[in-house]
Amino acid sequence: MTRVGNRILVGSVLVAAGVAQAQEALPRFEVASVKPSAGPTGERGQPGGRYTATRTVRFFIADAFFFGTPMQISRVIGGPPWIDSNLYEINAQASPPWPRSPDGPPRELFLMIRSVLLERFKLKTQMETREMPVYELVLARPDGRLGPRLQPSEAKCEAAMAAVQAGEPLPPRQPNEPPPCGLMGGPVRTLAGGATMQQFAAHLSNRVERLVVDKTGLAGRFAFELVFTPVVMPTAPPPPGLSPADPQGPSLFIALQEQLGLELISVTRPVDVVVIDSIEPPTPD
């Protein structure tokens, strides 16, 4: 799961007004360990309520305010330098476990992460709206034709959601097989079995570190493979079955146009940001 999977969740943002008040209002992990880490970074939420992650504190704050669209770390304003330089590991267990879903972890997980930040880091924040650059995801071709790699999906996601909520296990997937009702991404590609454009816009927000808003007008779910050359080439070999990055390949922006028939347009609009009023290094376990 990247950035806790491809998290397309619906909910309203609760503003942290103070530690005691927020702890009373927000759900909490049953147990949570916080300690400094040397890395590597990563994040994983698992069925059964297990959550493990190693990140910078600013990254955790962005996670804690993720609802519907991702909160990029550039939208977390202020704070001391150590929240960007020091890594911390959170190892936690929720009880009862959060509901399983083919679309990713639920809203409660991110509220629990916020509870850890409020309790252990004494985080105090406020929400503001500021004018910031964002991208709009639009159709690239005047005639509205989709790119050769973007196809409508036949995934029965409503039925899959109902089955999972009824207690049935998630269907097994082959290595490098995308989730049937979502998408997954690595350093040089994004694979989707049945993603909405809203899901894809949220995923791109993480890629470009800027809010991406879906303006395609495309309804339903789509299957696709998007392959591009990143700004920084990966040093690790690709997973078995996948080709390595092509240093001469298209950038993400060009690949979107050529492969999917989509385009990112830069605009300026009001954006919600999290302003850090105060934060402290975590209390020891």
Image: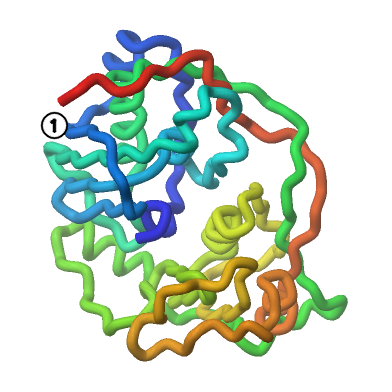
170 left or right, relative to 4: left
Name the residue rendered at 53%, 20% in the picture: 276
All told, the count of numbered labels is 1
Q: Position of residue 130 (x, y in %)?
A: 72, 28
**152 vs 46: above or below:** below
Residue 198 can be seen, yes or no:
no
Determine crowd level at label 1: few under 14, some 14-19, many 20+ residues with C-alpha closer than 10 A.
few
Q: Position of residue 60 (x, y in %)?
A: 40, 37
Query: Which image quarter: residue 141?
Result: bottom right
Name the one closer to the observer, 107 or 133.
133
Quadrant including the N terminus: bottom left
Residue under pointer 1: 30
Query: Which image quarter: residue 126?
Result: top right
Kind of residue at disc 1: Glu
Name the one closer to the observer, 145 or 156.
145
Quadrant including the C terminus: top left
Name the residue rendered at 53%, 23% in the picture: 79
Residue 269 can be seen, yes or no:
yes
**62 vs 28: above or below:** below
